[in-house]
Amino acid sequence: MSTPKDDLIATGRRTISPNYAPAPIVFERGQGVWLTDSEGNRYLDFVAGIAVCSLGHGHPQLSAALSAQAEKLLHVSNMYFTKPQIELMEHLTDRSFADRVFLCNSGTEANEAAFKLARRYQSRVADRSNKSTILSMKSSFHGRTLASITATGQPKYHDGFAPLAPGFEYLQFNDIDAVERRMDDDVAAIVVEPIQGEGGIRPASEEFLHTLRQLCDQFDALLIYDEVQTGVGRTGSLFAYEHFGVKPDIMTLAKGLGGGVPLGATLATEEVWKGWKRGSHASTFGGNPLASCAGQIVLNVIEEQDLLTNAKQRGEQLRRGLQELTEEFDALKEVRGVGLMLGVECGAQAKTIAKSARQQGLLINTAGGDTLRFVPPLIIDESDVAEALQRLRAALDELNL
Ligand SMILES: Cc1ncc(COP(=O)(O)O)c(C=O)c1O
């Protein structure tokens, strides 16, 4: 006999667009690092909506502020200012290299804006209309709109979508010689993730980012950091570029910025923003007071509760535990990442291990096909990390790896 949950899942499977294949779980609520499904089963959430729920689930300050904002004002468009939007933009510019912010609703939109800004800056401000090429990295991920999939240096995301956007080329990530060989006067911008996320949690080398900066300066190109996954405290600093000491000209954010409410941002220096005039670009929903309120609370809580230190300390604890498991289980090869953005390479077994972990009540997913990804909420405590490691061990034991 089918249960209400079975019926719900059958309806979901019949009606959801075929690009998704959700696990057979219907989540109903969350508290902190824990999610509860429709049958009352609890899961420790180290996926966090794919590095999104930075304050975990049901955070009291975020929930209260969003309820209050929803009662006051949801949306007015960018024809007018709102206080949450102004406060969010001020917070982001105060804490970063940037002077101005374009607010939008997702990572791919933030990247589209970055590409349009870079090209228009080159053609209209610097008067270099020969400069339109955007160099991106192999194994990168920049989103699913047409320019963003084109920038994404992974052919599987391009399959069947030709013709792609013109003017993008790919370089080997962390290969200094390759960039030095390719760099020329036609390059408008280089886009790079300081730590590749979807590509398998692979940090850029400091030397690589320094070389990109130096070559961009030498060839009048702009350096774009896609910090959609690494930004907003995930790595233990507010932005990952702070670990490397190399500033970009443009940076994109999304994911953790809204703590679960759709919110993206493109940040840049005053000089680069000269590329856009009134009407050059827009988003109807971008920066609406509800989403901006979420962003503002996320940034405030990160500061007030020193979640950057927490991300560093809990990241270290998790890294140590994963390292120990790697020494014990042959299937686990290498631990990579920074702060609370960690990956464990484990070859073709990755998906099987993630599924077994789920059966043990631990949610993790895979990146790059061969790497387990750990991106829990920034609010996790010592016992949550210990619990996750214990459940992962149980999953590995169960598989006899
Ligand atoms: C580095 C990076 N850029 C862009 C994106 C696209 O973000 P969104 O799915 O919000 O469009 C992602 C999503 O995984 C990402 O990891």
Image (cartoon, grey):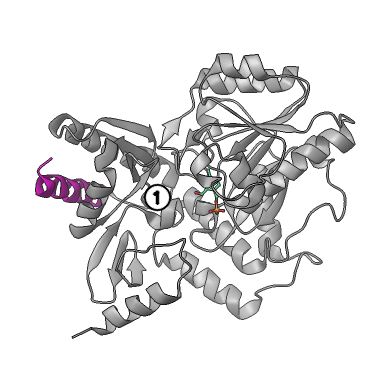
Residue 216 percent location from the top left of the image: 70, 23
Describe residue 136's horizontal placement relative to residue 283 as left or right: left
Check mark 1 vs ligand 1: CB closer than 8 Å? yes or no.
no
Q: Is residue 169 above or below residue 394?
A: above
Instruction: Give, as a single range, the part of the protein colored magenta.
Output: 382-401
Residue 107 among those drawn in magenta: no
Q: Residue at x 33, y 39 (%)?
A: 371
Q: Secondary structure at mark 1?
A: loop
Residue 239 x %, y %: 54, 39
The quarter in which the N terminus is drawn is bottom left
Instruction: Say which of 165 and 291 sits in front.
Output: 165
Q: Is residue 257 shown left or right of residue 83?
A: left
- Looking at the image, can residue 229 be seen? no
- Residue carrying label 1: 378
295 shown above or below 116: below
Report the predominant secondary structure element of the magenta stretch. helix
Please state, as top left, top right, bottom left or bottom right, where the C terminus lies in the image: top left
Q: Quadrant of residue 218?
A: top right
Where residue 152 sits: x, y (%)? 56, 40
Image position, residue 171 (x, y; %): 58, 26
- Seen in the picture, residue 244 relative to 253 is either above or below; the reply is above
